[in-house]
Image (spheres, rainbow, N blue to C red):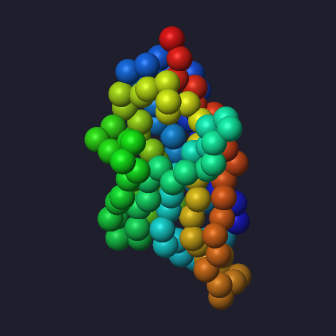
Amino acid sequence: VQLQAFGGGLVQPGGSLRLSCEASGSVASINAMRWYRQAPGNQRELVAIVGSGGSTNYAESVKGRFTISRDNAKNTVALQMNSLKPEDTAVYYCNADLRAADSAFLLNYWGQGTLVTVSS
C-alpha cells in the first residue's frame, strides 16, 4: 500500500491549484485523510483533515480558500486550493490512517511530497 500525490506546480498569486492523492494497493479501510505542508525552513504543518464520514477541519491560514474532499470508492483525497498566496508555497504531503487488506492494524501512511510554488 502506498499514497501517491499529484498536482503540484507553479501558479500565480490569486490562482488555483488542485492536489490529489490516491491510496493504491490492497486497502481494506481508510480513516482520516490529511494534507500537510512544509515550507523551506519551517516545520511540517497540518493544512486540512477529512474524516471517514466527511467531516473536515482546516488550518486558520487556509480557511475559506482551501477545500479538502475524499472519494471513498476510489481511495482518494483532494485539496482544492483557491486564492493562493506566496506564503502557500511549500511541499504538500498527503497522509492517511489506513488498514491494508493483509493487516489487522491501522497504520499511518505518507505520500511523497508535491511542490506548490505561488509566484508571479
Residue displayed at 70% across by 48% down? 112
Percent x, y for residue 111? Answer: 66, 53
Q: Observer-nearest residue: 108 or 72?
A: 108
Q: Observer-nearest residue: 54 or 118?
A: 118
**Residue 102 seen in the current view:** yes
Circle count: 0
- Could you tell me which quadrant the N terminus lies in? bottom right
89 with respect to 49 (left or right)? right
Residue displayed at 38% across by 21% down? 14
Percent x, y for residue 84? Answer: 42, 28
Residue that sits furthest to the left in the current view: 64
Residue displayed at 47% across by 17% down? 12
Q: Is residue 39 above or below residue 50?
A: above
Residue displayed at 52% across by 45% down? 20
Percent x, y for residue 95? Answer: 58, 59
**Residue 21 seen in the current view:** no
Q: Is residue 70 above or below residue 27?
A: above
Residue that sits furthest to the bottom in the current view: 104
Residue that sits furthest to the front in the current view: 41
Q: Is residue 105 above or below residue 8?
A: below
45 with respect to 85 (left or right)? right
Q: Observer-nearest residue: 91 or 18?
A: 91
Percent x, y for residue 41? Answer: 68, 38
Q: Is residue 62 above or below residue 9?
A: below
